Structures are given as C-alpha cells and as structure tokens.
Amino acid sequence: MDGIERSDLGSRRGRVDRINALSDDLLVLLLASLGCAAAAARASVLSRRWRGLWTHLRQIVFRGVALPFLEAAVGRVSPAVSLLEIHVPVPVPVLAGRLAWLEPAGIRSLLRAAARTKPEEFVLVLPRRSIQCVIDADLPCFHRATSIVLDSFFLLRVPDGVEFPVLETLSLTGCIVVDLDALLSRCPRLRVFRLKCRVFTPTANT
C-alpha cells in the first residue's frame, strides 16, 4: 500500500500543467469567460504568467470596483476594445449610515480615461442615490464607438471639435443635455437615439 501511495504521489508531481501550457490567446479567452474584468484580474493569483492578461480582453466589464480604483484599472486596458462597460458601485456606507458621495471630478476623469480605450461600445452606469448633485461633464471623443449608453445624472456638453463619426446608437438616461442639436450634428450615422432626460437649448446672445 505504501508503494502505491508513493507511486501515485510521483505521478502527480510529474503531471503537466495543461492550463499554463496554453497560449496567451487561449488564456485570454479563458479569462473572458469569467465575464468580469475584476474577476479576471483576481485570477492572476493562480500563476505569475496570468498577471496582466486581463488587460488584453476584448470585452471589458467592471462591476464592484470602487470609483477611486476604476480610473487606474481602465488606464491599464489595451486600446481598441470592442466593449467597455462600467457599473460604478454604491460607496461603502460611512458614519451614521450616510453614503460617501461619488465625487464629480472622479467621474469626469473616468470618462476621459474610458475614451482613451477607444471602445466600439461604451456603457457607464452610476448609482443615482450616491450622487449628491448633477455632474457637469464634457462628453469626450469616442471616435470608434458605434454605441454609447450613459445612465446617471449628467449635465452633458459636447466641446468644439468633438465628433462621433461612426456612432449608431446613443442612449441617455437621467441626463441633462446642453444643446441637443449640437450633439446630434456630431453623430452623422446615428440610427437609434433613446433619451430619458431634460434638454436645455442655449439662447443666442443679444
């Protein structure tokens, strides 16, 4: 019996690590099956070789990553992803059950970081009960985006020179749009437009 146990132990030590023997492309596909970039990043504890592979996913979905860490995480994403989807979680409750409000500056910075990933599809969802006031933000250029979904309290402006040349679907929920005509004029291929928000049209100076 002792001989059998030793033989079995030796065979286990001699086994080939078939997962780590896979190519990087196949490992990335394996991480993609987790459906969450944060979960894929945590999987790096399994092997040194896995570290950083999540940044090469074509579809990046962030759930449960606190706002202070999101911009850095998004900044590690390889450009030209097919999907960047961000669900900002409710901040951890602080004293007396009060919420730590999401900082507008952090949201604006996150938007700019997201634009740098050059996604084909972009989704940003913020927990409304964690926003103390409307977030005044310029909508950065997503020149590869065919679909943009924003769900939160934004006061959106489109700066001069910002265009969305291939955008086909635009969904805005809970937003306030400053000069809707200007926004739509920057989207020459727009086919689907969903708007659940207020619209401000600036008056000409006299």
Image: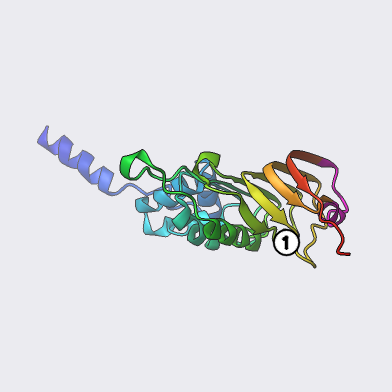
Residue type marked 1: Cys
Residue underneath mark 1: 141
Q: Depth check: give the residue in front, 152 or 155.
A: 155
**Mark 1, other Cα within 10 Å: few <14 / some 14–19 / many ≥20:** many
Residue 25, position as x, y percentages in the image: 56, 54
Image quadrant containing the C terminus: bottom right
Q: Is residue 191 magenta?
A: yes
Pick the front one: 76 or 131: 131
Who's the residue at 37% across and 54% down the image? 47
Left or right: residue 84 versus residue 34 is right
The one nearer the camera, 98 or 128, is 98
Residue in the image at 74% along x and 49% along y: 177
Q: Which quadrant of the rendered structure holds the N terminus?
A: top left
Provide residue 103's location: percent of width, then percent of height: 50, 55
Count of numbered circles in the view? 1
Secondary element at image label 1 = loop
Does the magenta run of residues contain 100?
no
Specify whether 137 is left or right of 194.
left
x then y, percent, for residue 156 = 70, 53
> Quarter of the image holding residue 2?
top left
Can you tell which quarter of the image residue 108 is in? bottom right
Residue 82 in sight here: no
Span highlighted in magenta in the image: 181-192
Relative placement, left or right, of 190 versus 29 is right
Q: Residue furthest front?
A: 206
As drawn, the residue found furthest toward the left would be 2
Residue 99, position as x, y percentages in the image: 41, 44
